[in-house]
Image: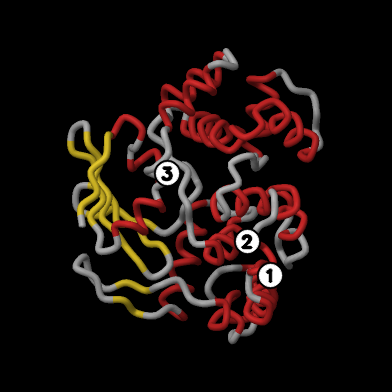
Amino acid sequence: MKIDYDATYFVPRDVLECGQIFRFEPYREGYRVFSADKDCYLYTDGRRTYAECEDGDYFYNYFDLARDYGGIIEKIKSFKIPVLDEACEKAGGIRLLNQNREEMIYSFIISQNNNIPRIKGIISRICEGLGQKISSPRGDFYAFPSSSALAAQPPEYYKSLGAGYRDAFISETAARIAAEGTKCLEGLDCGELKQKLITYKGIGPKVADCICLFGFAKREAFPVDTWIEKLYREDFGGTLTDRKKINAYFTGMFGELSGYVQQYLFYAKRSKL
């Protein structure tokens, strides 16, 4: 199947390079994107963006294509904040992905105090070591492993793959999810979900916000990291130093639009677009 979409609000580079996903690689004229046990070829040709895949319904939802991002940007611009208006113009091709929930839990545990190339490498090695080999028209690849497969390995295994001190976090959280499942995370509002997530080994407030935003579509979540702190001070004239208070400042201002605002600001600031 070939998904065809207006490139104005769907730019592959913006979607993939903004820090919300770690399983993708350059491929032909664009990117090859992996999610759970599926893959697609994502590229732009002129004013259209295309996703070639076998499961069109999955990737249509994955890329959040039913949502009107032009309307979202108009709402964001109604706040009349110059730095935010500029970010929307420069990073307007971003779409917030609807990613596999368990994959997001482990991916963002790995992401803490880490850089994107290293995160991608660790996740790739985990998939190659424990994931099922999948055949695709674009070449074989490895699926993201199940929690049971992850739980079957000791912490030392993850350390050997470069996870460092996060080894125990992956192992212990995998054991818990393999035993309990994730039903207990369903149907919660953003605040409840965040509080539940931080009871898992290796998940703090920032990682929980990322999982809420990218794995559970809680668009009112607003992850605060070093870049957001910098932006808060330099572009919003903020004086708070506690990340929880900075989070409350932004979510109080932007409400249900917080997650979109965070991504536009974060990507534009970090990339110096």
Near-viewer residue (4 or 232): 4
Which one is earlier in the sequence, the residue at label 2 or at label 1?
2
How packed mark 1 is, by other alpha carbons closer than 10 Å (few <14, some 14-19, many 20 or more), is many
Q: Marks 3/1: CA distance? A: 26 Å
Q: Secondary structure at mark 1?
A: helix
Residue 180, compared with residue 81, is above or below; it is below
Q: In the figure, is residue 238 to the left or right of 112?
A: right
Residue 64, compared with residue 123, is above or below; it is above
Query: Residue drawn at (41%, 33%), measured in percent from left and top?
Result: 68
Q: Residue furthest bottom?
A: 152
Q: Amino acid at mark 3?
A: Glu
Q: Residue furthest front?
A: 187
Q: Residue 227: x, y in percent?
A: 61, 36
Which one is earlier in the sequence, the residue at label 2 or at label 3?
3
Query: Residue drawn at (55%, 34%), measured in percent from left and top?
Result: 266
Residue to which mark 1 is pinned? 169
Q: Does the residue at mark 2 contact the one at mark 1 (Cβ under 8 Å)?
A: yes
Q: Amino acid at mark 2?
A: Ile
Near-viewer residue (41 or 169): 41
State the scheme by which the image is colored. secondary structure
Q: Secondary structure at mark 2?
A: helix
Residue 217, compared with residue 234, is above or below; it is below
Q: Residue 185: x, y in percent?
A: 67, 63
Q: Residue 269: x, y in percent?
A: 53, 29
Q: Where residue 109 is drawn, which disc sits there?
A: 2
Q: Amino acid at mark 1?
A: Phe
Image quadrant of residue 129? bottom left
* Placement of the N terminus among the 4 image quadrants: bottom left
How packed mark 2 is, by other alpha carbons closer than 10 Å (few <14, some 14-19, many 20 or more), is many
Q: Residue 149: x, y in percent?
A: 53, 83
Q: Marks 2/3: CA distance? A: 19 Å
Q: In the figure, is residue 49 to the left or right of 60?
A: left
